């Protein structure tokens, strides 16, 4: 996979902070740019991001079924691969 730009959405939670840390490490491996921002999926498309890295708090299956989450929405809608990172 050719990764030149990583978008790392954040909601300023602890899980997001861990995802940003992971994005920086992976960007270093690939000599890629990293953008950390509050998630807006159209920005990922505009920036031609090759990968989105997002933190997850670990809701249970019932919570995900009834309410969903930002991470769940990003994984389902994103046009590029999404890596989720739990603490």
Image: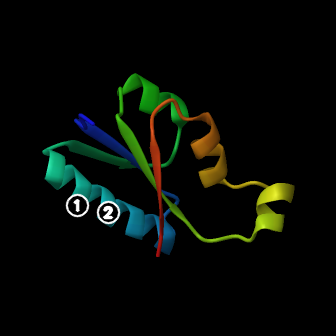
Are discs 1 and 2 less than 8 Å apart at CB?
yes
Q: State how far apart marks 1 and 2 are (Cα).
A: 5 Å
Q: Which residue is mark 2?
A: 22
Q: How dense is the environment of label 2, judged by Cα within 10 Å: few (below 14), some, or many (20 and up)?
A: some
Task: Residue at 23% x, 34% y: name it.
Answer: 2
Q: Quadrant of residue 7?
A: top left
SS at badge 1: helix
Task: Residue at 27% x, 46% y: name it.
Answer: 34
Q: Decide: is 61 above or below 9.
A: below
**Colour setting:** rainbow
Residue 28, image x, y percentages = 15, 54
Using residue 70 as the reference point, say whether residue 86 is left or right of it.
Answer: left
Q: How dense is the environment of label 1, judged by Cα within 10 Å: few (below 14), some, or many (20 and up)?
A: some
Residue 14, image x, y percentages = 48, 74
The N terminus sits in image quarter: top left
Picture disc at residue 25: 1
Residue 48, image x, y percentages = 35, 26
For this orientation, the residue located farthest to the right is 66
């Amino acid at each position: 996979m050719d990764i030149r730009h990583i978008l790392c959405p954040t909601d300023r939670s602890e899980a997001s902070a861990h995802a940003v840390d992971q994005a920086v490490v992976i960007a270093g491996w690939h000599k890629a740019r990293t953008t950390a921002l509050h998630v807006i999926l159209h920005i990922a498309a505009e920036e031609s991001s090759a990968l989105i890295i997002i933190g997850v708090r670990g809701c249970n299956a019932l919570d995900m079924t009834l309410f969903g989450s930002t991470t769940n929405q990003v994984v389902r809608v994103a046009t590029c691969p999404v890596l989720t990172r739990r603490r």
